[in-house]
Image: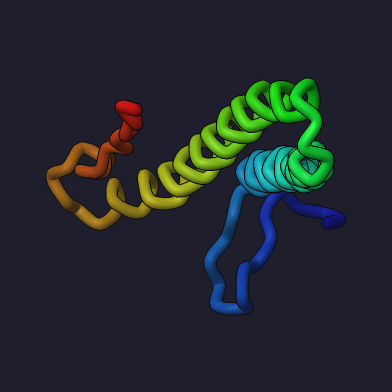
Amino acid sequence: MEGGDTFSVHGNGNQVDNKAFHAFQKSFVQVQSILNQNRLLINEINQNHETMIPDNLGRNVGLIRELNNNIRRVVDLYADLSLSFTGPMEASSGGDSGGKLGHKRVRHVNES
């Protein structure tokens, strides 16, 4: 991107701020890193399960917790990205929502 701070998206004339693009790119890199880590965790969980060794099965409890936390982080990153995209759009649409979405992520807790 030589000579400017913006670039065209889909050739339709919409301009995206260079800083915003880099923020989105950073978030997607974080998501990809977490997903790669999850792949490794799932492989280890599967290997531990196949051995049926009690210590390995016990270790899976912590690995599954880590996997769940990673999934929450990915959901939060995507939610932040979504708000970054929709916030400016809603503000410019003239709606009276104050730039906030009416959606709230609800966490469901298993009671087992």
Q: Is residue 69 above or below residue 95?
A: above
| On-image quarter of the C terminus | top left
Choose between 61 and 1: the one closer to the eye: 61
Q: What is the quadrant of residue 57 in the picture?
A: top right
Decide if residue 22 is in sight here: no
Choose between 87 and 1: the one closer to the eye: 87
- What residue lies at 59% left-to-right and 55% top-to-bottom? 16
- What residue lies at 83% left-to-right and 40% top-to-bottom? 51
Q: Is residue 14 above or below residue 98?
A: below
Residue 32, given in percent of the width and then of the height, sits at 74, 47
Choose between 12 and 71: the one closer to the eye: 71
Decide if residue 51 is in sight here: yes
Residue lying at the far left of the rendered structure? 96
On the rendered structure, is 96 left or right of 46?
A: left
On the rendered structure, is 46 left or right of 81?
A: right
Residue lying at the far right of the rendered structure? 2
Q: What is the quadrant of residue 37 in the picture?
A: top right
Q: How many marks?
A: 0
